[in-house]
Image: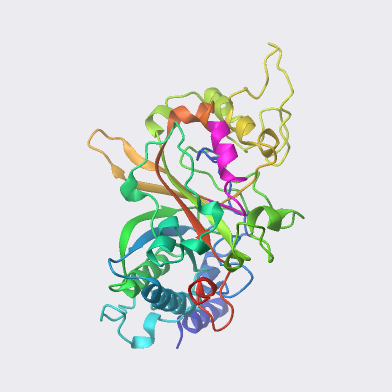
Amino acid sequence: MSRRRLLGTAGAAGATGLALGAAGGAGAYAASRPAPATALTSVGTDSVPFHGAHQPGITTPPHSRGHLIAFDLAPGAGRKEAAALLRRWSATAQTLMAGEPAGGGVAGADGSHDTGIALDAGPSSLTVTFGFGRTFFDRTGLAARRPAALDPLPAFSSDHLDAGRSDGDLWIQIGSNDALVAFHALRALQKDAGAAARVRWQMNGFNRTPGATPHPMTSRNLMGQIDGTGNPKPSEPDFDRRIFVPATPAAGTPSWMAGGSYAVVRRIRMLLDDWEKLTLTKQEQVIGRRKSDGAPLTGGSETTDPDLDRLGPDGKPVIPGNAHARISTPEANGGAAMLRRPFSFHDGIGPDGTPDAGLLFVCWQADPLKGFVPVQRKLDRGDALSAFIRHEASGLFAVPGAAREGEYVGQRLLES
């Protein structure tokens, strides 16, 4: 019996008896409006299709658990080995996303067998998303097919980047609403790599669980700020143009990227001890929004547009000139927009009691030079939030469109 059927049977028996903006602050919005509230007993039954116009995990509602992992191809591995690896990974992702056991009992690439970590769980909205880093194209002899949009990101004054936790030949994003299901996918894909690739870095993240609030709400980040108000919406007429490479790509973008997107990944540590020393009023001035409900300081509700021209009784702007919400708004950046889909992280507490915690910032756009870069440059020049965050790792990845039936992800690149 499949995991999906097992959970569905159990559910039937029972029935009868979560801006930072580009800088990683509180303007880092969730990928879309929150999904309707879900009874916790049904969370495991939800599934996301592997095939489609775009890879899963981009417009999928935010998950409660996530893993980001980057690999480098092993010395001597090239295009042939990469194609075989993506074929294995795609097959495993499709199987797990359908709620089925990994490998069907067959030994993996490293000779081991699945341990049944998630045997009694459903698919839990699992998604697996694959991307290629800039160096992948050199190592596979495909430099001529590398998109121009994968040119290295510019340096920013706020960067304190660890090269060992940045970039990579291959990148995978895993998301699920069950921690064991997410870890199972991580472990299965790691084993699938076999001798073809080795882990470069790996990061773990979390968000609020669907159904954990009495009604649908935008999630909060570790600073306590409502974090998901101004994201582009799939219902907007220009959404696809901003987020996805068109079916007929423009000059400089190869045809294999049709339907794809570009992911900017940043590990952004929040200096929570410093942040928590601020008064509520000061925190709201740094962000430009009320902490209680995410509404702009100029009034209204969370979705009210901020009145950036309104002055207070003292003659000063109600939303300060260096407030994160003011600087990161598309109106202040030539309309630059990106789909932010982050995870929070906490990797322990140091000897001095300082938490290693913050945001795994992931944003999606059709062109990072028109999405992430102009906004980050603006934030880098004077965002009040910059004093309370530190960018510690960075990566840029080309994420092709979803595999068609019978294909593996990246096949149009690797076999053309």
Q: Is residue 240 above or below residue 93?
A: above
Task: Tell me residue 181's x, y (percent).
Answer: 42, 69
Q: Is residue 173 magenta?
A: no
Residue depicted at x 40% and y 72%: 79
- 372 or 219: nearer the eye? 372
Residue depicted at x 27% and y 77%: 110
The magenta segment is 363-379
Q: How many marks?
A: 0
Q: Is residue 374 magenta?
A: yes
Task: Tell me residue 407's x, y (percent).
Answer: 53, 80
Q: Is residue 199 above or below residue 124?
A: above
Q: Residue furthest front?
A: 144
Describe the colour scheme in one phrase: rainbow
Q: Is residue 322 left or right of residue 97?
A: right
Q: Is residue 401 above or below residue 116?
A: above
Q: Quadrant of residue 36?
A: bottom right
Q: Residue furthest left?
A: 351
Query: Is residue 77 at least partly visible in the picture?
Result: yes
Residue depicted at x 37% and y 47%: 346
Query: Is residue 289 at least partly visible in the picture?
Result: no
- 303 or 340: nearer the eye? 340
Q: Quadrant of residue 273?
A: top left
**Where, quadrant-wise, is the N terminus in this rendering?**
bottom left
Q: Quadrant of residue 34?
A: bottom right
Task: Tell me residue 167's x, y (percent).
Answer: 40, 52
Q: Is residue 58 above or below residue 5?
A: above
Residue depicted at x 54% and y 28%: 383
Q: Residue furthest top?
A: 314
Task: Tell me residue 197's x, y (percent).
Answer: 32, 67
